[in-house]
Image (cartoon, grey):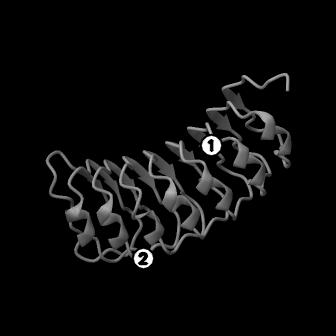
Amino acid sequence: STFSLLRELVLDHNQVTDIKPLESLTNLQRLHLRNNQISDLSPLATLEQLESLALQNNQITDLSTLSSLKKLTEVYLGWNQISDLTPLSSLEQLTTLTLNHNEIVDISQLSPLTSLKQLDLSSNQIENIEPLVSLVNLEELYLNRNQIIETGALRQMPNLSEVYIYNNPVENFICPTTQDALCFL
């Protein structure tokens, strides 16, 4: 293909629905497809060099294709219709993950992602944040606009420096005990 050596591609705001033409761009490391109408991610399976993937504001429900993209370090999936996070559990290189404004209730599949430094789960239906205690490298955590009542798990996260947890029915909020921690209630 003419663009086979392409490493970065930005196709934001282009009303893209079909990403099959991207299959041959196997050297891509950064791909931005924000604000389109994409629902099928299967053509991304061939893009094994991807490190950064931005798919905010599309029509994505199925993340299964992403499980094979082991080099991903940044994934942006806000403003979609995602509920099942299972395919993300194998992406152990992830340092940044945004899943704001989706349909997420269960976050237990995120437990293996111990390299995460920034995690945005705001505007979902999450009640239980206990699965996050394994994320020992997490520095920034966005949990605002969920259904969280209990925050004790935050005390077990040694590197948290910023926690956003406003608009939750929290009882007895416990701020992380880390030095310089900022909690936004």
The residue lying at 33 percent from left, 58 percent from top is 135
The residue lying at 78 percent from left, 56 percent from top is 40
| Label 2 neighbour load within 10 Å: few <14, some 14-19, many 20+ | some
Vertical side of 66 occupied by 83: above or below:
below
Q: Foreground: 67 or 181?
A: 67
Q: Foreground: 17 or 41?
A: 41
In the picture of the structure, the residue carrying the numbered disc 2 is 127
Is tag 2's residue or tag 1's residue first in the polypeptide sequence? 1
In the picture of the structure, the residue carrying the numbered disc 1 is 54
Residue type, mark 2 in image: Glu
User: Residue 160 location in percent, x, y?
Assistant: 26, 51
User: Residue 121 location in percent, x, y?
Assistant: 47, 60
Residue type, mark 1 in image: Ala
Quadrant in which the N terminus is drawn: top right
Q: Foreground: 133 or 151?
A: 133
Q: In this view, does 105 lie to the left or right of 22?
A: left
User: Can the viewer see residue 58 in this picture?
Assistant: yes
The residue lying at 30 percent from left, 76 percent from top is 150
Vertical side of 88 occupied by 97: above or below:
above
User: Residue 183 location in percent, x, y?
Assistant: 27, 54
The residue lying at 36 percent from left, 46 percent from top is 117
Q: State if disc 1 and disc 2 touch (CB < 8 Å).
A: no
